[in-house]
Amino acid sequence: MNWSVNDADSARATKRNYEGVPHCTCRGSCSTKICGCVKTSVSCGTACRCQHALCKNRNHAAQHHDKENQVSYLRHLQ
């Protein structure tokens, strides 16, 4: 396969957890395009492994909404 630098960056930017949800694995503030979420123009979410206190790419209203949806989904499974 003929990979270019952009292909490698795209593959890294779309990491997914075991449920298929995209996430980043940042250790910093998620403020540059090193962050996979910033690179793909999405807010960091609950699946991201970045530190909540440091992250500058989180949408706190959306994060609350994600938690509500997750709780509703888990109740539905029971």
Image (spheres, rainbow, N blue to C red):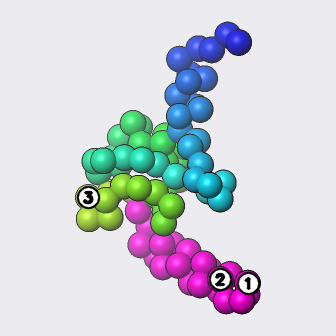
Q: Is residue 49 above or below residue 64?
A: above
**Label for residue 5?**
none
Report the residue at 55% width, 74% height from top.
Answer: 66
| Closer to viewer: mark 1 or mark 3 | 1
Q: Which secondary structure, mark 1?
A: helix
Residue type at numbered disc 3: Leu
Dot 2 corresponds to which residue?
Answer: 74
Report the residue at 52% width, 28% height from top.
Answer: 9
Question: Quarter holding the C terminus?
Answer: bottom right
Dot 3 corresponds to which residue?
Answer: 54
| CA separation in Å, label 1 and label 3 | 34 Å
Residue type at numbered disc 2: Leu
Q: Which secondary structure, mark 2?
A: helix
Callout 1–callout 2 Cβ contact below 8 Å = yes
Expressed as whole percent of the image width and height from the top left, the position of residue 36 reads 48, 42
| CA separation in Å, label 2 and label 3 | 29 Å
Callout 1–callout 3 Cβ contact below 8 Å = no
Magenta-drawn segment: 58-78
Q: Is residue 68 magenta?
A: yes
